Structure formats: C-alpha cells, structure tokens
C-alpha cells in the first residue's frame, strides 16, 4: 500500500494525472485497472479518476491482486533461452503472434507462456499477460516476458528509458547499401493513408535505428540493426524509408511474398538489467534455418 499526501502545488489536478506523476511504478495504461478494481481511495473513499485533488488529501493506492488469466493455455513447444522466478526469455519463431487480438485468440506466444508458466504479470491487461515488448508476427527472435508485476514494471521502465538495454536484429534488405554504417533518425507514427501501417511522419514519436552492413549480395544487403528506441515496425519502416525495405516484407516492401517464411528479420541479441538481481544479462540466438538458407542462396 502506498500513501501520498497532496501538497499545495498540486491542487485541482486530476487524480489519475497526479498518481502517474507521483507514483512512478504505475504506468498510465495500468492505472485504469487500479481504478476498475477500486484500489485507489482519497480520504478513505473510493473516487473516480477525474476527481480533482485538494491540498491535504490522503491518497491511498493498494496493491492489485495478481489474478489467474482467463486466456486459453495452449500446449505449444517453446524455445526457452532462460527462465527464473521473475522472467522468461524465449526465441519466438516467425509466424507466431505474440499476444491475443482480433482474429488471433489462441495459438499465440502468450497462450503458450501461460501453459508453461501458469502465471504471468497482468500490468498490460489480460491479453498482454507478461509482455514487456513485442516483435512482429513474421519476425523471429528473442523476447523477454515477466511472471510478476514488480518485474514487469521495472523492465518496462528500463526499456522505456533505454537504460542498459540491447536489442540487435539481423535483416536481409533489398538493394545494395553503399555505406558501411548509418544512423536513421526519423519520427514514426501511424500512416495517415493506411491504419495497418506505420510511417515516417512529422510529429511522430522519436525513432532511432543504427545499422551496420555485414555482407553484400547482387541485389540485397545483410545488415545488423540496433534499436535505440522501440517503435512499432521500427526497423521495417526505417529501412523502407531509406529505400531498402526488408526482404519479403509485404507491408513495407514487396506486394507479394516470394516465400512463406515472412520478412527476413530476426531479433538476434537481447540485453537488459535483471529486475531483481540488477545484473546485466545478454542473450544471443542463432538465425532461423530459413534465413541461413536464403543468405547461402544469395551468395551463389
């Protein structure tokens, strides 16, 4: 339980905004669940998020009960790279959706994780149980999930603040990139012409990607991409924006995929500070066989 007393400078601020500003462990999106479960009181009374705080108000925020998820538990084999009481790192295959959404209510990574771990954090809501960061359905590679809310909050803040994190991808992109290294600093937001896509747009969120050329082929380039930020579809959008879309990407590159594998993009390395031990941990993964085969084919 957390207790906060309102000081004179904070009078007449909405309660939800006041809590986000003063109680850093709760994100704006998670706060909704605190109010839904009546875990927030002012002067011992349940109030709405729109309540305007007054000088001297005593705000009490009670811990949420971590509940069993109502989602299906699917017995799907997982490639587990690391696991302990707080976190689990998995190597996700291309083609697997990360969490349930419209059209994908089962068979996702979350459904498989619930079957394996039985309990995951619910900071992001039931459908995103355990998920701190995502990778696209047709992107393969490393992802960390959390088993409890404390670990989730700490890791989410770490990723948000870009503190001691390493997210490195390998991609095959269309065309030959002439320079060996580059930094792409272009803001990303929803594409105004297609709500299914992201795009480089004025007023979008800051997005920075570093790339290094690893190999060049006749019509393609093998690159390592390192994320400074983590926007939706960031590498796919950025590489397309500089004229080198990810190979076999139907959304930002080719109109029709040439192989069933999906875009040739793999989250190879993942590093972060463990939420409990505070030890920096880094994990690496092998490229999927389909990507290795394509690289060998392009070398011929």
Image (spheres, rainbow, N blue to C red):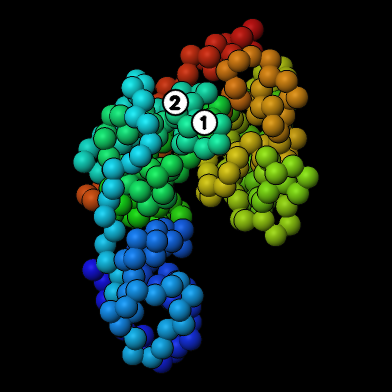
Query: Looking at the rendered structure, which numbered label has been put on residue 107?
Result: 2
Question: Which quadrant holds residue 2?
Answer: bottom left
The residue lying at 76 percent from left, 49 percent from top is 192
Q: Would you place residue 79 above or below residue 168 in this image?
A: above
The residue lying at 46 percent from left, 23 percent from top is 93
Q: Which element is circle 2 on?
A: loop
Name the image quarter holding the C terminus: top right
Camera-side residue of 39 and 258:
39
Query: Looking at the rendered structure, which numbered label has been put on residue 104?
Result: 1
Q: Position of residue 148 (x, y in %)?
A: 28, 48
Question: Which quadrant holds residue 281?
Answer: top left
Q: Along the horizontal axis of the image, is 72 left or right of 105?
A: left
The single residue placed furthest to the top in the displayed view is 300
Are the residues tagged 2 and 1 within 8 Å (C-beta)?
yes
The residue lying at 42 percent from left, 50 percent from top is 124
Camera-side residue of 102 and 112:
102
Q: Residues within 10 Å of mark 1 (few under 14, many from 20)?
A: few
């Amino acid at each position: 339980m957390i207790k906060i007393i309102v000081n004179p400078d904070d009078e007449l601020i909405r309660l939800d905004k006041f809590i986000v500003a003063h109680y850093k462990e709760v994100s704006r999106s998670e706060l909704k669940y605190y109010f839904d479960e009546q875990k927030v009181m002012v002067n011992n009374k349940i109030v709405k998020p729109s309540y305007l705080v007054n000088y001297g108000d005593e705000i009490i925020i009670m811990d949420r009960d971590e509940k069993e998820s109502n989602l299906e538990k699917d017995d799907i084999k997982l490639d587990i790279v690391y696991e302990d009481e707080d976190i689990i790192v998995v190597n996700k295959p291309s083609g697997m959706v990360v969490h349930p959404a419209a059209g994908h209510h089962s068979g996702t990574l979350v459904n498989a994780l619930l079957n394996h771990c039985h309990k995951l954090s619910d900071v992001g809501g039931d459908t995103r149980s355990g998920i701190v960061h995502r990778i696209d359905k047709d992107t393969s590679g490393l992802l960390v999930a959390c088993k409890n809310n404390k670990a989730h909050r700490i890791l989410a803040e770490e990723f948000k603040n870009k503190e001691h994190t390493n997210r490195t991808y390998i991609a095959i992109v269309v065309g030959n990139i002439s320079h060996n290294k580059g930094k792409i600093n272009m803001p990303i937001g929803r594409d105004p012409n297609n709500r299914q896509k992201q795009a480089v747009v004025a007023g979008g969120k800051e997005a920075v990607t570093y790339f290094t050329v690893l190999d060049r082929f006749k019509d393609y380039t093998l690159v390592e991409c390192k994320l400074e930020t983590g926007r939706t579809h960031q590498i796919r959008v950025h590489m397309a924006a500089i004229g080198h879309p990810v190979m076999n990407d139907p959304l930002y590159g080719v109109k029709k995929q040439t192989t069933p594998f999906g875009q040739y993009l793999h989250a190879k390395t993942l590093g972060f500070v463990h939420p409990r031990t505070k030890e920096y941990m880094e994990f690496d993964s092998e490229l999927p066989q389909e990507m290795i085969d394509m690289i060998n084919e392009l070398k011929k």
